Amino acid sequence: MKKTLNLVILGPSGSGKGTQARLLAEQFGLEHIEVGDMLRELARKSTSLGRKIDRIINKRGEFIPAELTINIIRLRIQSLLKKQGIVFDGSPRKLIEAKTLDDLLSRLNRKIDKVLLLDISEIESVGRLVKRRVCRKCDANFAIGLDITKNQTKCSKCGGRLYKRKDDTRERILARLKEYRKKTLPVANYYCRKCKLVIINGEQSIKKVHQDIIGELKGLIQ
């Protein structure tokens, strides 16, 4: 690559942000910053912060306050080498986070190069997530009827136990989608005004979505 690459992947729940972020991280040696995974790990801990995060994301299906999210991201970025590229997975989720992240990156002599929005319908999002199962050991994601059978309980990659996330019920999925439309779409508009937003059809195969992303990044990676 010609330069350090800093990307953001946005999209509604179930759009495949994590999968595409991991593919990009592996292909270009990027640091994969996935705030959702970090928050879910904290939510499993029996601490005051863990219980607070659990109430917000698992019981109420809401987003974490912007200040907390940015602090988590800041600590992660500051631990990296200056030339280490980053792919931000599903973050920033609010307009204030996007503006604060831009300010933070500017102070660290970085900037967002491209924002990739994986677009899928609400029906597709709900359909994918109600069938999602996650491995407790390696955090791999599987879909009933696609990767696993309905009664399968063990991860085919590491043998860990599969489970359904607390927030993957229809009611909580719809609540997250409502939050997404209200708070994250303004983030997309913000980056659109900066001529950094690219919309990708997220309802295609994983391979085709990845190919489309690479096509949009050609000017940055050649």
Image (spheres, helix red, strand yellow):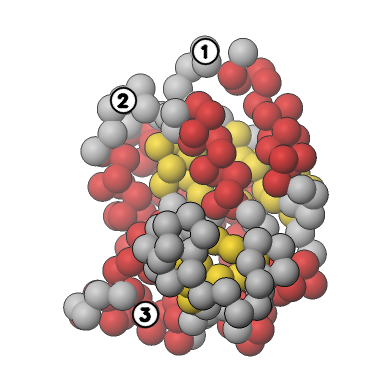
Q: Which of the 4 image quarters holds residue 210?
A: top right
Is mark 3 in CB contact (under 8 Å) with mark 1? no
Label 1 secondary element: loop
Is mark 1 in CB contact (under 8 Å) with mark 2? no
Q: Position of residue 9 (x, y in %)?
A: 58, 46
Label 2 secondary element: loop
Q: Position of residue 65 (x, y in %)?
A: 40, 68
Residue at the spot x=68%, y=29% of the render? 214
* CA separation in Å, label 3 and label 1: 41 Å
Q: Is residue 112 visible?
A: no
| Label 1 packing within 10 angstroms: few (<14), some (14-19), many (20+) | few
* CA separation in Å, label 1 and label 2: 15 Å
Q: Earlier in the sequence, mark 3 or mark 1?
A: 1
Q: How many marks?
A: 3
Residue at the spot x=52%, y=59% of the render? 156
Q: Amino acid at mark 2?
A: Lys
* CA separation in Å, label 2 and label 3: 33 Å
Q: Position of residue 63 (x, y in %)?
A: 48, 71
Q: Amino acid at mark 3?
A: Asp
Q: Which residue is mark 1?
A: 2
Q: Amino acid at mark 1?
A: Lys
Q: Which residue is mark 3?
A: 54
Residue at the spot x=64%, y=35% of the render? 196
Q: Which residue is mark 2?
A: 82
Q: Which of the 4 image quarters holds residue 132?
A: bottom right
Closer to us: 198 or 22: 22
| Label 3 packing within 10 angstroms: few (<14), some (14-19), many (20+) | many
Q: Earlier in the sequence, mark 1 or mark 2?
A: 1
Label 3 secondary element: helix
